[in-house]
Image (spheres, rainbow, N blue to C red):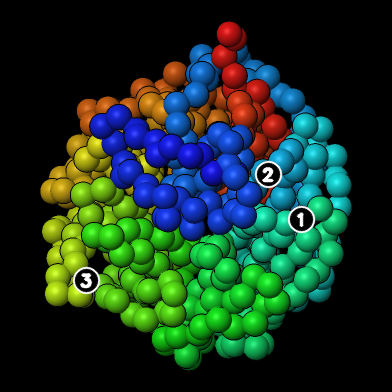
Amino acid sequence: MKRRKQRVLAGSLRILTAPIMIALVGLLTPMNDACAQWPQFGGPTRDFTLPAGNLKLDWPDGGPKRLWDRPLGEGYAGLSVVDGTLYTMYRTDDREVIVAVDADSGKTRWEHTYPAKLYSQMYSDRGNGPRSTPLVSGDRIFTVGISAKMCCLDKAKGIVHWSHDLMKEYDATPLLWGYSSSALRYRDTVIVPVGGKGHSVMAFKVSDGSIAWSRHDFPNAYSSPMLIDVDGQTQLVIFMQPAVIGLDPENGDLLWSHPHETNYNVNASLPIWGDDNILFISSAYNAGSRGLKLTRQGGKTVVEQLWTERKMQIHFGDGIRIGDYVYASSGGNGPVFFSAINVKTGKIAFRQRRVISKTQILRIGDQLIMLGEDGELAGATVTPKAVTVHSKVKLLDRVAWTAPTFVDGRLFLRDNKTMMALDLRAAP
């Protein structure tokens, strides 16, 4: 499942080299079209961005054509889709369920369930369901539940190959709102932040779940790991509680770190990397955003903070970079603005109210699909001056904190109790 040519998004984003693309996609089989599979958190390139598609954004009053919908247990786990099968997770009573669903019909193909008692330090005000997105790689699927139970299963039958209780075995950080990080495939390992002393970040061998490396003492946060290329060196970037850090994915060596503390230790959004070597990071809870310039000098990585800006605060969703600007919902538990910020200067380009509630964003070419936490779906386009919403419709009834998934013209959505598939393809 690997697209053989690099894609260039006009006036935007980085160009991914072949080694980084392979590591990000994390699959062992060739890739056909970047729009044809969604194997992990953030999609094929882990940045919620896909090449241009022929999408219809002017929807009728009822929204895009609904292909199917079905009930699903509690959770915000993302939806991975590979080879016609959708994989996600949910909670029922004191058990978590990993489920494989036919992407065409919504019917269950298999389920694996296991005990998942919540740990005593966890708050339940945001729900008790799993938060992370399954990683599908080769013939296996990798998941981590809300209480930090990690599983490796056969993707066709749901048979367990190996598992770990990250809390009991490695003293994973007991996050107040539960474990949320999504696993990342790098070569023959699967990498997850854990947070215990000496187990800040861990890499497990895909084959048998044995430890490839385990390093550092940073407590874990809610964000997920990602890979970037800094002047030819592949680096693993992770937002931990007190800082954003860069590691060597081969052995876990610390390459650099930069402080970024928040109230309640909530670093939840995914950092955003550009081909200008600027790393954008953002949090709510009195932290705001930073622009960090990374360069390799004398065999070491030098971190230069270009700017800070508290008016841009991404709470838990994702941001999308287009050209020199990052577009995202900005705001914590108060008013929410849809905002744009210049990553080179930190200057706010615009802040608009009443666009949509706090949103998860998917970019397809020059079009944006946005899912608000209140269940509204919007189709939009943006410039550094404003966001233009072309259609908006209420589709989900409960808290919708799960980012949309797009595969082969179909959009897959879920809230805390329901899952559905929509047809976004424009008429030929």
Q: Earlier in the sequence, mark 2 or mark 1?
A: 2
SS at badge 2:
strand
- Residue 301 got which mark? 3
SS at badge 3:
strand
Residues packed near mark 3 inside 10 Å, few (<14), some (14 to 19) or many (20 plus): some
SS at badge 1:
loop
> CB under 8 Å between callouts 2 and 1?
yes
For this view, does 79 lie left or right of residue 275? right
Residues packed near mark 1 inside 10 Å, few (<14), some (14 to 19) or many (20 plus): many
- Residue 82 got which mark? 2
Amino acid type indicated by mark 2: Val
**Residue at image location 76% in from the left, 55% down from the top:** 155
Above or below residue 92? Residue 61 is above
- In percent of width and height, residue 360 lies at 48, 43
Whole-number angstrom distance, CA of label 2 to CA of label 3 = 36 Å
Whole-number angstrom distance, CA of label 3 to CA of label 1 = 38 Å
- Residue 155 got which mark? 1
- In percent of width and height, residue 291 lies at 21, 57
Q: Quadrant of residue 406?
A: top right
**Which residue occupies the foreground of this view, 258 or 372?**
258
Q: Earlier in the sequence, mark 3 or mark 1?
A: 1
**Residue at image location 31% in from the left, 53% down from the top:** 273
Residues packed near mark 2 inside 10 Å, few (<14), some (14 to 19) or many (20 plus): some
